[in-house]
Image: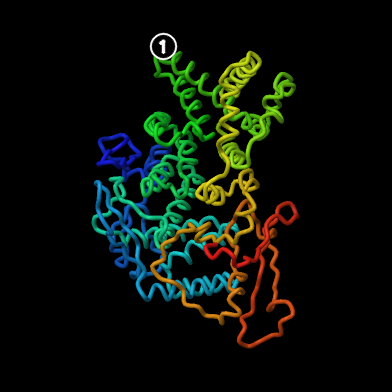
Amino acid sequence: KKNTTGDKQVYMIDFIGTYPILFVRNLNPETELKRYFGARAVLGDQRPRQRQRQFHRSTWMTIPKDTWPRFSRPGISMTLLESRDGLQFFTFEHSRDYQQIQFKFLDSVESMDPNNIVVLLQMNPYHIDSLLQLSDVCRIQEDQEMARDLIERALYSFECAFHPVCSLTSGTSRLDYLRPENRAFYLAVYKHMVFLERRGCPRTALEYCRLILSLDPDSDPLCMLLLIDFLSLRSREYNFLLRLYQDWEVHRNLSQLPNFAFSVALSHFHLSQEDQTESKERERLKHKADLLLQNALIMFPGVLMPLLDLCTVQPDAAVLSHDFFGPRSQQSPALAELVSLYVGRTHTLWREGGVLLWLEECVREVLRRVDTKDPLVEDCQNKRKQRYQSAPLNIHRHVILSEIKEATSTLPLEVTTQSVMGFDPLPPLDSVASYTRPERWPPRFAFLRNCSILFLCIISYTVTPGNLTFYNIVGPIGYKSNANLPTLRLGIRLSRSGSSVWSTTQDNGSDPSR
């Protein structure tokens, strides 16, 4: 919905009343599991657990566990910056003690030894960035339970620091992604959402996706609009997706995103197949689904062939012999990135027999419209040439976080040649830093600081411990060992199928924002 205040329009993300509403009960995965399997199957005969005394704060996003270290405020607080247009703008802040811990964490990252982060967490068990980084390490080592537990601990620490007037459910609380202290909260919620979806709780994951989007719907720094359609389809929230599309299309041009063009059509199709839908409504929904899917295929012909390939479906002779879905459908790198992301993420939703038959019908109709010179075909071709010239930074950031190999392989060189940090991937170029790390090395060795970057996040491929190759370099080439010069260990190289794909690179120092 739109809330017009003066000359500025504030866009909302839900449709109940004036402001978006996130339902607290939907933030708890047990609510969804009970709906699927029943309360007895989820809870068994266990009695409600009494929280230990150290967990005195009531929280919504996570439930503190008895196995967690005793909680004491780690030095994070939330401040209300301003209130305007019915919105409250908050920011997290670090105390001086927490800043010192943060500096130690950065030293641990540069040491290239995850054990140093473990030691830091033993001393400071609720340090956020250490929890995020170590969670990635645990995922690499396939310890999913520990990885999820660390993220939940980070969320608990954040929620205990919330400002009294900060509300997750009102949709009016904003966090500026330009501030590094806030970015950690975005990432913690995102990673928690991913674990929920993989756990089989897509409805709960959708609620967290809406939460992230509500924190900064205008900038959408993690590009949740590229994910919200998938979670809506997975949780069968078709009407929500259609309402979102209807309300946001005017000002956000959602139809120009491949994921919305195809997912909206798929939502109409699923609604037309529901038993409770009346026959006339079924016909209307089915006709609209046909038209939407045909238009999506005409606008984004590059989706079809990789989608059929991942669905292990062999195209028929009519499709293979026609050049519309072949080389003629060449697309810009930016559009290829969006298409690859959508296909890699949602191909499982198209494997159903009824959906594939519907897709086949629409493909045949598209070929007929192409052969009869439908004006829409040329119009869409011109749009593809004029638009999608380059992808903004938030899309690249989303692709990196998605870990979808079909998409990460399309990232441009200006992204792949950067050092990407798991606790802060692709920070904004115009970040607002409230404090800076003191310079520890002499200026003549400052360039070495850019070299010793830990590259532990999983950027593109499913990485197993066997795919990690370490290279140790002591000092720069041609420089003698010096007691005052730290030892550098460079280069965790991520590889796939035995071939080197990514490697740690050295910044040339020309762009200080990297």
Please, which residue is most extreme toward the top here?
280
Q: Horizontal placement of 99 versus 194: left or right? A: left
| Residue 345: quarter of image | top right
Q: Secondary structure at mark 1?
A: helix
Q: Tag 1: residue type?
A: Lys
| Residue 474: quarter of image | bottom right
| Residue 232 or residue 90, whichever sits in front | 90
- Residue under the point 51% across and 30% down: 261
- Residue under the point 31% across and 34% down: 15
Colour mapping: rainbow
| Residue 458 or residue 396, whichever sits in front | 396
- Residue under the point 43% across and 68% down: 127
Quadrant housing the N terminus: top left
Count every numbered label the image shows and give the total. Answer: 1
The image position of residue 168, as x and y in percent, is 31, 49
Q: Horizontal placement of 232 versus 12: left or right? A: right
- Residue under the point 63% across and 49% down: 412
Q: Is residue 263 above or below residue 148?
A: above
Q: Horizontal placement of 214 versus 444: left or right? A: left
The image position of residue 121, as x and y in percent, is 47, 71
The image position of residue 471, as x and y in percent, is 70, 69
| Residue 264 or residue 27, whichever sits in front | 264
Reading the image, the residue beneath label 1 is 280
Quadrant housing the C terminus: bottom right
Q: Residues within 10 Å of mark 1 (few under 14, many from 20)?
A: few
The image position of residue 492, as x and y in percent, is 66, 64
Q: Is residue 258 above or below residue 56?
A: above
